[in-house]
Amino acid sequence: MIDSVADRVTAIDAARSEYLDALLSNGVITDTGVPGVYGKSRDFERVLGGFDRFVTESGVDQNAEVLRFPPVISRADFERSGYLKSFPHLTGSIHGFRGNERDHAQMLRMLESGEEWTGHFHSTDLILTPAACYPVYPLASGELPANGRLFDVQSYCFRYEPSSDPARMQVFRMHEYVRIGTPDNVRRFRDLWLERSKAMLKSVGLDAKAVVANDPFFGRGGAILAASQVEQALKFEMVVPISTPEALTAVVSCNYHQDHFGKAFGIVTADGDVAHTACVGFGLERITLALFMVHGFTPSSWPTAVRTTLGL
């Protein structure tokens, strides 16, 4: 049994490496020398942009407030979110140089001699955005309108998890819809997008299925949180094969946060209750990679229905 599991892991790793090599050799992405950080070709961006528009078009009936954020959030809002308690291993903070000329000269000497020089940089009031929905919750603080609020957001995101798996990028884009309101409204929203996102993926040729999932919580206490998340079915993912059919990868995440962000940011319903939140997030790079895997490296030869949907 151990050998079969080990062999399966080895085969999956080999398939991921093979797909990464194919992406690079076909010029779909460009190696930067850092695992999980790639340059993107014109075709990659056209496909990604096409699906991004598809997400927007699929949510027109939601009458969402549209916001596009930079890939950073304030340190104060990040601390309030509670992210650091659960995901310190994924967090990326931004540091800057605050020294004088003497400090600068010393830093350059350390650089030239191959010493560690980053001690001259200190934390700023910015954190790299871990998920596109995080900048929304501070904006919603206070009392909500009678029917709550609904946002359409998109942002670059960062998670510190260097990997040779092409689908596990450290820097990536998420397009999300975020619902804030009563528990009933929020759960209906999550269930709606669970079905809608599956249909969207299937319409562009991706064999998606929904699975109950958990977030990668940190440490032994995180295992308890993950088990509770699964038990309550708070998180569903749409998974598809990317590098290999033997390993499915999440490309859409449908999450019910209960009152976590409502409490953290003082968001209340029109009735005075703590607001609940949910989001559906589309991983645009992962979906793009899945499309290239299924349809090949030449988008102009993809099925007509797929090209029409993506505007290619």
Image (tube, rainbow, N blue to C red):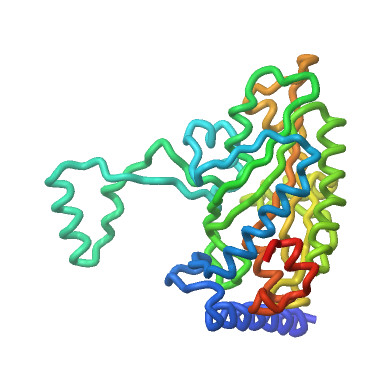
- Taking depth in this image into account, of 288 and 235 the one nearest to the observer is 288
Taking the image as shown, residue 258 lies to the left or right of residue 174, namely right
Taking the image as shown, residue 121 lies to the left or right of residue 277, namely left
Is there any visible trace of residue 132 in the rendered image?
Answer: yes
Give the percent coordinates (x, y) of residue 140: 64, 26
**Residue at the spot x=73%, y=33% of the render?**
150
- Taking depth in this image into account, of 263 and 59 the one nearest to the observer is 59
- Taking depth in this image into account, of 106 and 156 the one nearest to the observer is 156
Q: Quadrant of the C terminus?
A: bottom right
Give the percent coordinates (x, y) of residue 295: 73, 76
Is there any visible trace of residue 232 in the rendered image?
Answer: no
Give the percent coordinates (x, y) of residue 254: 77, 48
Q: How many marks can you see?
A: 0
**Residue at the spot x=83%, y=57% of the render?**
198
**Residue at the spot x=74%, y=46% of the render?**
280
Q: Is residue 275 above or below residue 110?
A: above
Taking the image as shown, residue 100 lies to the left or right of residue 208, namely left
Q: Quadrant of the N terminus?
A: bottom right
Taking the image as shown, residue 146 lies to the left or right of residue 311, namely right
Q: Is residue 262 above or below residue 280?
A: above
- Taking depth in this image into account, of 308 and 60 the one nearest to the observer is 308
**Residue at the spot x=74%, y=20% of the render?**
145
Q: Is residue 152 above or below residue 209?
A: above
Examine the image and state in which quarter residue 110 appears: bottom left
Give the percent coordinates (x, y) of residue 71: 50, 46
